[in-house]
Amino acid sequence: MNYIIFDLEWNQCSAAQENRIEGLPFEIVEIGAVKLNSNREVISEFSQLIKPQVYREMHYITSKLVHLHIEELESGKPFPEVMKKFLEWCGTDYIFCTWGGLDLTELQRNMRYYKMPDLADGPIKYYDIQKLFSLAYEDGQSRRALEYAIDMMNIRKNIPFHRAFSDAYYTAKIFDTIEDPNVIEKFSFDTYHLPKTRDDEVHIVFSNYDKYISRKFENKSDLLRDKGVMSTVCYKCGRRLKKKVNWYSLNGKHYYAFSGCFRHGIMKSKLRIRKAEGGGVYAVKTDKYITKEVMKEMLRKKDEILEQRRQRNSVEA
């Protein structure tokens, strides 16, 4: 299997928001990529400018950051032509890799705008190298800029940043430094296309947690009533667990629950509700075993926040 490490540069509407094209907030103007073999050695490169068809004026932020001008892009090819060549270059046995979680979504959004065939009919498994960098070298939560990572790893900067090929090249350099198998196993899923049915939903178990991605629901109420979404099951033994603390939320988007498995201890479940492409919502749920002390600290913070809100509301009343 090969690794396709790619980066995109895109433009957006330079005028008022009402002039933005529905379904295409960002128009891709450059694709750069490197192909690595299974040993993570570079075996091929791809770089192509794309002639704008939608936003014909360069947004000032894009021009300043990327150092591209609309005159340069006029020499590019139309997106469908470039995308077809890119997919042919990718081959058949590969996994996408990006720095962050935006590029694969925007790639598919541009493909849909041009009525090209979908890359997949559900979530796409890929490597978010930005996340892997944090898991390997930092706290697992922070998300750093690519140049920060290059500097931290003392990798020589021999080509300028903020062009599609150069950023793909540097992302490959970071990927090559990550050797911990417990980090490498932590692939991500792009959810531009969601599971269509309950049977298609994503259930994946990693070494120290599991992840679940639901199908789309019309609204949050329907999602929160679904027993499959709200159940807590031990990902180590498959046993349905009784909740010690039922689901609660402090912001209406993230929900937490704590359950007990007599074999494995206390399991923390985190449910994130996200907006689906084209309307509706879906859930991403993760389960992880924690200590009793961690659970108590989370509940203490919850009570503290709720008490602060109660006092604030009482003053305002």
Image: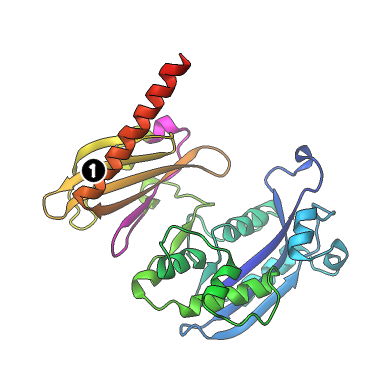
- Residue 122 x %, y %: 48, 54
Instruction: Give the colour scheme of this rendering.
Output: rainbow
**120 sits to left or right of 213:** right
Residue 241 in view here:
yes
Q: Amino acid at mark 1?
A: Lys
**Looking at the image, which residue is at 43% across and 45% down?**
215
The outermost residue toward the top is: 317
Vertical comparison of 23 with 280: above or below: below
- Name the residue carrying label 1: 296
**165 sits to left or right of 202:** right
The outermost residue toward the left is: 262
Residue in the foreground of this view, choosing between 103 and 180: 180
Vertical comparison of 133 with 266: above or below: below
Residue in the foreground of this view, choosing between 262 and 2: 262
Question: In what element is the residue under mark 1?
Answer: helix
**30 sits to left or right of 176:** right
Quadrant where the C terminus lies?
A: top left
Identify the image quadrant of residue 88: bottom right
Q: Which residues are magenta?
A: 203-223
